[in-house]
């Protein structure tokens, strides 16, 4: 489901310059207001979208990749249904982020197949991957914002690149997305001056402007304060529950995953030790999973 759409072709007598297409502003307001509504950031409850059986929109089939002779992923398989959220969990260095980079086409697997909506993408050239990336966007750990552009210019970039909107319409959308990210006070600031959490929030606003079907999040809560983490998590929830986005979230934080995940992929030493529903993961008797969950729940004593 698109967050917003380009206006239809104008009538033979277009409205005066500067006026919106009739109903466009109301449509944008309704869709963006849906994201601004409060969401109970409580333990995960499946949405109507995610609870319905669906053909997988993303499939990894026995995917393997190695670097300098060291196996990073070995015969890893999983799938994600439309409108679902998959959380990839595991310790550092087990290939969680590598999986996202292969899905974006930045890396090619040594073997195995990766499909997006039934299309096999591992054999696509850069031109073919550009078409796939119009449907998938990724929020990187560092935000990956353009350093030479202000916050406003960064968020507006995907809209201007796609075209089809008048400048006043671009500004309307950008203002609402920036407000959604809580970045109204830094609209003219450049990324180098922003905190890690602010960069990530702005990157999420820019990701929305790209109108994706699938959003990939690489450790969205790493090195951010709890308030920012809660805000980012709430936004990911809204995108799923209210607009039906398909998401893959790479994280080491099981408490964060519990609020988001329909399914969990747990990677250990390059292999998929678990793939299945969140509830089954939390109840797993596997020794390695129990150790991971225990370590994540551990709280340092105050004295």
Image (cartoon, rainbow, N blue to C red):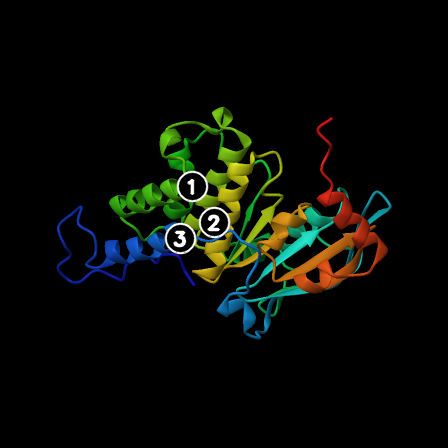
Identity of the residue drawn at 58% across and 51% down: 216
Label 1, label 3: how far apart the Cα atoms are = 10 Å
**Quarter residue 68 falls in:** top right
The earlier-in-sequence mark between 2 and 1 is 1
Q: In the rendered view, would you say 246 is above or below 218? A: below
Q: Which residue is mark 1?
A: 181
Mark 2 secondary-structure assignment? helix
Label 2, label 1: how far apart the Cα atoms are = 8 Å
Q: Which residue is mark 2?
A: 235
Mark 3 secondary-structure assignment? helix
The earlier-in-sequence mark between 3 and 2 is 3
Residue 79: image location, x then y, percent = 66, 65
Relative to 29, 235 lies left or right: right
- For the N terminus, the image quarter is bottom left
* Tag 3 and tag 2, C-beta contact below 8 Å: yes
Q: Which residue is mark 3?
A: 35
Q: In the rendered view, would you say 186 is above or below 251? A: above
Relative to 219, 200 lies left or right: left
The one of 136 and 227 positioned closer to us in this rendering: 227
The earlier-in-sequence mark between 1 and 3 is 3
Number of numbered discs on residues: 3
> Is residue 53 something one can see in this rendering?
yes
**Quarter residue 115 falls in:** bottom right
């Amino acid at each position: 489901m698109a967050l917003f759409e380009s206006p239809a072709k104008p009538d033979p007598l277009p409205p005066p310059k500067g006026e919106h297409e009739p109903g466009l502003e109301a449509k944008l307001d309704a869709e963006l207001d849906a994201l601004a509504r409060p969401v109970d950031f409580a333990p995960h409850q499946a949405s109507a979208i995610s609870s319905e059986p669906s053909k997988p929109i993303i499939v990894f089939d026995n995917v393997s990749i190695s670097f300098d002779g060291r196996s990073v992923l070995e015969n890893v398989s999983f799938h994600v249904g439309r409108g679902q959220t998959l959380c990839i969990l595991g310790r550092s260095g087990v290939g969680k982020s590598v999986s996202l980079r292969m899905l974006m086409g930045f890396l090619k697997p040594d073997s195995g197949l990766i499909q997006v909506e039934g299309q096999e993408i591992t054999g696509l050239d850069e031109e073919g991957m550009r078409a796939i990336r119009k449907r998938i966007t990724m929020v990187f750990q560092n935000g990956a914002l353009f350093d030479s552009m202000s916050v406003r210019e960064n968020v507006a970039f995907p809209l201007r690149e796609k075209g089809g909107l008048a400048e006043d319409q671009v500004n309307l959308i950008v203002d609402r997305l920036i407000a959604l990210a809580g970045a109204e006070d830094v609209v003219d600031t450049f990324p180098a001056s922003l905190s890690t959490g602010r960069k990530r929030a702005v990157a999420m606003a820019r990701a929305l402007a790209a109108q994706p079907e699938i959003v990939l999040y690489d450790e969205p809560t790493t090195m951010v304060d709890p308030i920012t983490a809660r805000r980012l998590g709430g936004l990911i929830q809204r995108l799923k529950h209210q607009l039906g986005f398909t998401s893959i979230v790479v994280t080491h934080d099981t408490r964060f995953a519990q609020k988001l995940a329909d399914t969990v992929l747990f990677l250990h030493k390059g292999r998929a030790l678990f793939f299945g529903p969140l509830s089954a993961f939390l109840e797993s008797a596997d020794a390695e999973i129990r150790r991971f969950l225990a370590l994540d729940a551990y709280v340092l004593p105050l004295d």
